[in-house]
């Protein structure tokens, strides 16, 4: 008689109930007690229906076991032992793919000298010192970039334009003229453009704030939080901390900019992992609506790089803040921990990613010279170039990138249950760690799996207790790609 075996899954519990995250389909299903018991028995090795009913006889009768088997087979959580799951074929996206988000590096200059910055440290990949890339993007290049963006957006009605640096506001004149030009050209071709920028806040003068408010420009501020944290790494070229300069400017922006949520992006280092304290400072002292955290991208030998203990500490902090997020969301209150919200969105949409992010697909970065690259972090790097705004996307280079970076090539990830969400991790991180963008981010797999498990639990509990909150993710079909 044919037996049954479990298929690839991750079991977790939320609100005292068992759930399965089914890896091939990225679906989440709740289990009743009989189905849960069948899964637990089958995990120990394939069993026939008669063996199962006999092993579970003390607790469940035959009808309950048969029903559980039927359910589990339908959802493909189990299958006949003699029938192996077919490996998923490597399907490359069909090009040309529409460009969703263009990140324009309007300058590679910065008035801060943050010690951990990937753009200026030994880890940098873009030649910003030897004249290979101009310090500032010219208006002509910016206009060519707008034309490139509108053309490559294809049939998409909305294009997202994000300004980045260096310190973005150091090239304010070009930024303003680009917005005017993009609005006018988009209207002419029947499209709309959404604008956003990332800044260190040092140049947020009253007239700049007024401009951002009036033009509905979305703002993300790179800001690490309390003075002792901000002043440790986010310093001016003479070594002075920036907190006292930026704090009043950030407050003024937050008081006036009500048309778009203003977000903070915090860089976490080995000496700066008190995520909950930072979150409280940024939301309660400043009023940030969204706060996202990212571990510093650096080679492991820097003293501020996160080691294993650091990742554990960060996970404990993330877990505690995710708990706060869950409680607030269930109670119908806003909570701005964006890391958990972003992962929940992917889980809710059942995303099973062949690539970790939109870099080189829906997202591209443009350097100050007009070179097009995988994303903003690679903009200006010759080895990660995908064309120019003048000549368009180099389709052969893009196809080669898509082929080499597909999840199916990452053999280390083949048996990992978190791969639908992680898909091998950030290319820039891989480049910094292993000098190879095709490598999986194996240095923090345990962290990724543990964090995905936390997010699955938060998701399942919200789905149970406040399902209406999740409806927001059903509406956003053409969201901007994330810029981190
Ligand atoms: S990088 Fe690690 S966590 Fe991510 S999919 Fe691969 S094996 Fe899993
Ligand atoms: S995740 Fe990494 S590769 Fe992807 S867009 Fe962000 S920085 Fe670039």
Image (spheres, grey):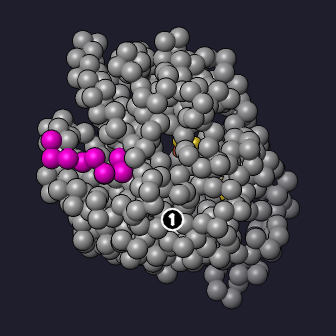
Q: Is residue 13 left or right of residue 220?
A: right
| Count of marks, rendered view | 1
Indicate the position of residue 17 as horizontal and vertical percent values: 51, 77
Residue at position x 22%, y 56% in the image = 249
Say which residue label 1 marks. Answer: 268
Residue at position x 36%, y 71% in the image = 227
Residue 201: within the magenta?
A: yes
- Where disc 1 sits, the SS reads strand
Q: Quadrant of the N terminus?
A: bottom right
Secondary structure character of the magenta stretch overall: loop
Q: Is residue 456 left or right of residue 54?
A: left
Residue 109 in view, yes or no: yes
Residue 287: within the magenta?
A: no
Q: Which residues are magenta?
A: 199-207
Q: Residues within 10 Å of mark 1 (few under 14, many from 20)?
A: many
Indicate the quadrant where residue 418 lies.
Answer: bottom right
Indicate the position of residue 325 as horizontal and vertical percent values: 36, 70
Q: Nearer the viewer, residue 136 or 20?
A: 136
Dividing the image into four equal quarters, which quarter contains ligand 1? bottom right
Indicate the quadrant where residue 124 lies.
Answer: top right
Indicate the position of residue 476 as horizontal and vertical percent values: 34, 42
Residue 192 in view, yes or no: no
Indicate the position of residue 303 as horizontal and vertical percent values: 64, 67
Q: Is residue 322 left or right of residue 249?
A: right
């Amino acid at each position: 008689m044919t037996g049954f075996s479990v298929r690839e899954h991750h079991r977790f519990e939320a609100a005292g109930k068992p759930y399965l995250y089914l890896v091939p389909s990225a679906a989440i299903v709740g289990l009743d007690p009989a189905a849960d018991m069948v899964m637990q028995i089958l995990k120990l090795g394939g069993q026939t229906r008669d063996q199962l009913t006999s092993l579970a006889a003390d607790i469940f009768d035959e009808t309950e076991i048969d029903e559980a088997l039927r359910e589990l087979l339908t959802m493909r959580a189990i299958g006949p032992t003699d029938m192996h799951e077919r490996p998923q074929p490597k399907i490359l996206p069909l090009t040309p793919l529409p460009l969703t988000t263009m990140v324009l590096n309007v300058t590679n200059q910065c008035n801060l000298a943050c010690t951990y910055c990937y753009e200026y440290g030994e880890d940098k990949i873009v030649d910003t010192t030897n004249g290979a890339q101009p310090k500032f993007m010219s208006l002509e290049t910016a206009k060519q970039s707008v034309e490139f963006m509108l053309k490559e957006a294809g049939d998409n009605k909305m294009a997202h334009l994000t300004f980045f640096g260096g310190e973005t506001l150091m090239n304010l004149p070009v930024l303003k003229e680009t917005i005017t030009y993009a609005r006018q050209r988009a209207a002419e071709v029947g499209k709309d453009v959404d604008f956003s920028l990332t800044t260190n806040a040092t140049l947020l003068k009253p007239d700049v704030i007024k401009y951002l408010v009036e033009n509905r420009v979305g703002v993300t501020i790179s800001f690490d939080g309390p003075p002792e944290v901000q002043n440790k790494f986010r310093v001016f070229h003479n070594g002075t901390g920036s907190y006292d300069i930026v704090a009043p400017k950030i407050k003024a922006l937050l008081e006036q900019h009500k048309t778009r949520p203003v977000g903070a992006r915090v860089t976490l280092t080995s000496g700066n992992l008190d995520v909950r304290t930072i979150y409280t400072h940024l939301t309660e002292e400043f009023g940030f609506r969204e706060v996202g955290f990212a571990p510093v991208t650096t080679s492991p030998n820097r003293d501020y790089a996160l080691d294993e203990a650091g990742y554990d500490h960060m996970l404990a902090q993330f877990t505690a803040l995710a708990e706060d997020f869950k409680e607030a969301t269930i109670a119908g209150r806003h909570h701005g921990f964006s890391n958990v919200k972003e992962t929940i969105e992917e889980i809710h949409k059942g995303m099973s990613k062949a690539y970790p992010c939109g870099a080189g697909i829906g997202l591209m970065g443009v350097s100050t010279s007009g070179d097009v690259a995988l994303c903003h972090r690679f903009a200006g790097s010759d080895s990660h170039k995908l064309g120019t705004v003048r000549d368009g996307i180099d389709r052969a280079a893009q196809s080669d990138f898509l082929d080499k970076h597909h999840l199916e090539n990452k053999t280390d990830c083949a048996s990992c249950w978190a791969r639908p969400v992680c898909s091998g991790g950030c290319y820039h991180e891989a480049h910094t760690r292993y000098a190879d963008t095709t490598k999986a981010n194996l240095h923090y797999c345990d962290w990724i799996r543990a964090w995905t498990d936390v997010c699955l639990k938060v998701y399942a509990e919200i789905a149970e207790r406040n399902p209406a909150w999740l409806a927001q993710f059903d509406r956003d079909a053409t969201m901007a790609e994330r810029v981190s």
